[in-house]
Amino acid sequence: MMENNMGLRGKVALVTGAARGIGEAVARQMAQAGASVVVADVREALGLSLAAELENALFVHLDVGDEVEWGRAVNQCQSRYGRIDVLVNSAGIFHTAPIADTSLALFERIVRVNQTGTFLGMRAVLPAMKERGGSIVNISSTSGLRGNQNSVAYGASKWAVRGMSKVAAVEFGQYGIRVNSVHPGLIDTPMNHEEMGHDRIREVGASVPLARAGRAEEVASVVAFLASDAAAYVSGGEYTVDGAMSAGVLRSRFSAKSTQ
Ligand code: NAD
């Protein structure tokens, strides 16, 4: 699909959280478009089997909250491919709880992966990317655009991802490095299966303006576009992939009359 027109052929992409879910879909689409992909994750078995399946891929064990592991992952990528053109920060964890029930330990655990992990990743690839420019795509959430109930820690981390993406876009522009954030809504991935279960995903999906949950591939195609040369002048932006979930309030699907 993207083979000819997306400008990813020959690029080297490091994708975090690539063992499953959105990261996996990103890794698959990029490999299909001709990029070499570094599959980075803490889930070794899944990550190794994905890397073995893809055309030109390498698995690296990476806990994104660990500064030392970032150094090692970037070195492994450099010694195998000699460059890094794309970083996708998709690794993330999700847990819902009211503010009153959010322990400091839970808050810090979520921030460590989602927020600190994204910061460390952008900083770690900078020296390599500076040489020829590149693209960084950070996966935030609709929770990084508004205040969703029961997600104080997750929301804090995702607002931070959105904000840090803009700071990096401003700082890194001089090196030809573009930075954008992507804001998925309700996406049918293992993360949501574990947190909500299949029936609840369908139930909540029905309340989305597009009347369903999204698929990981539908997020991945936006990420692939932002990573590619087709988006050469796109930086500092935020892109929802949420079926219009964050566009407004759907009062009644079947009522044509305005209530206000
Ligand atoms: P997922 O749980 O299916 O996949 C996340 C991956 O991240 C897993 O492979 C996991 O092993 C990895 N990971 C977790 N902690 C890590 C760490 N410390 N270091 C490295 N890898 C780690 O989740 P997903 O639904 O694919 O979510 C991907 C991203 O999209 C996350 O940042 C998430 O917050 C965001 N997001 C998801 C949804 C959704 O509805 N699924 C919505 C909005 C945003």
Image (tube, helix red, strand yellow):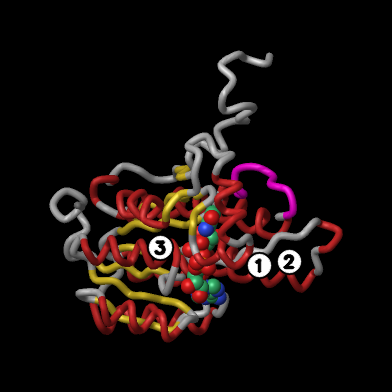
What secondary structure predominates along the stretch shown in magenta? loop
Query: Circle 2 — which element?
Result: helix
Residue depicted at 20% across the width and 52% down the height: 2
| Corner quadrant of residue 216 | bottom left
In the picture provided, is 258 more to the left or to the right than 150?
Answer: left
Between the C-alphas of marks 2 and 1, the distance is 5 Å
Task: Tell me: residue 219, above or below residue 57.
Answer: above
- Percent of width and height locating residue 117: 55, 69
- Percent of width and height locating residue 209: 52, 34
User: Label 2 sits on what residue type?
Assistant: Phe
Q: How dense is the environment of label 2, judged by Cα within 10 Å: few (below 14), some, or many (20 and up)? A: some
Residue depicted at 57% across the width and 38% down the height: 246
Residue depicted at 27% across the width and 84% down the height: 79
Residue wearing tag 3: 88
User: Label 1 sits on what residue type?
Assistant: Ile
Q: Name the mark on residue 107.
A: 2
Seen from the viewer's position, the closer of residues 239 and 208 is 208
Query: Circle 3 — which element?
Result: strand
User: Label 3 sits on what residue type?
Assistant: Val
Tell me which label, 1 or 3, sits earlier in the chain.
3
